Amino acid sequence: MLKVVLLLCYILSVQTVEAKTNANSKVRNSLIDAIVLHSIGGPYCENGEVRYSGAPGDANRWRIFFERHKVLGIHYIVDRKGLVVSSIAENAVANHALGWNERSVGIELVNDGDGNDRVTRRQWLALHRLVGRLIKRYSAITVDRVFRHSDIDKRTFKCAGKEIKQKQDPGLSFDYERFVESLR
């Protein structure tokens, strides 16, 4: 029982930092009807070998990265300790998912995206709470409209003669089916 009480206290105390709209963001003109889940890290090819970029640091480090980036943007970042940081306001477009930016809220998990770096329990709980709030806030977002970046972006690159999926996030170690089912 004590564990349950402590867990609830933690969930209710997850810190959220308010958004600062990126200078490159524009006001959204479309209905928000989807959430896209990402991981910071992703694959690239180096000397004929697929490598992953990694994701050192916490949510605030990545918020600064996105706010300084001339092209990329994200609405929320959830780090390994469960800290949720807002980068671009929800009413602004964040450039996070080709063809989906106008209609979706983008959430980055601080994760290597390599299938080995597991999402922490705190990260999972914070993401669950955030996505649950977004589903309640936007009537057009249902559980079936929570997508992995890998579901909606099919681009590939070549490495050592093989086609490699460019967008693999949030990664094989993220149990998407269990996450979506837990939102129902």
Image: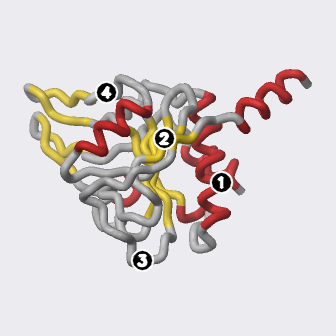
* Residue bearing mark 1: 132
Q: Nearer the viewer, mark 4 or mark 1?
A: 1
Proximity of marks 2 and 1: CB atoms separated by less than 8 Å: no
Residue 154 in the image: state x and y as whole percent: 29, 57
Q: Nearer the viewer, mark 4 or mark 3?
A: 3
Can the viewer see residue 114?
no
| Quarter-of-image position of residue 142 | bottom right
Q: Amino acid at mark 4?
A: Gly
Which is more toward the observer, 160 or 41? 41
- Tell me, for residue 54, which label it has, or none: 4
How far apart in space, not on screen, are marks 4 and 3 (Cα)?
A: 33 Å
- Tell me, for residue 30, which label it has, or none: 3
| Circle count | 4
Proximity of marks 2 and 3: CB atoms separated by less than 8 Å: no
Proximity of marks 4 and 3: CB atoms separated by less than 8 Å: no
* Residue bearing mark 2: 85
- Where does the C terminus fall, quadrant-wise? bottom right
How far apart in space, not on screen, are marks 2 and 3 (Cα)?
A: 23 Å
Which is more toward the observer, 37 or 67? 67
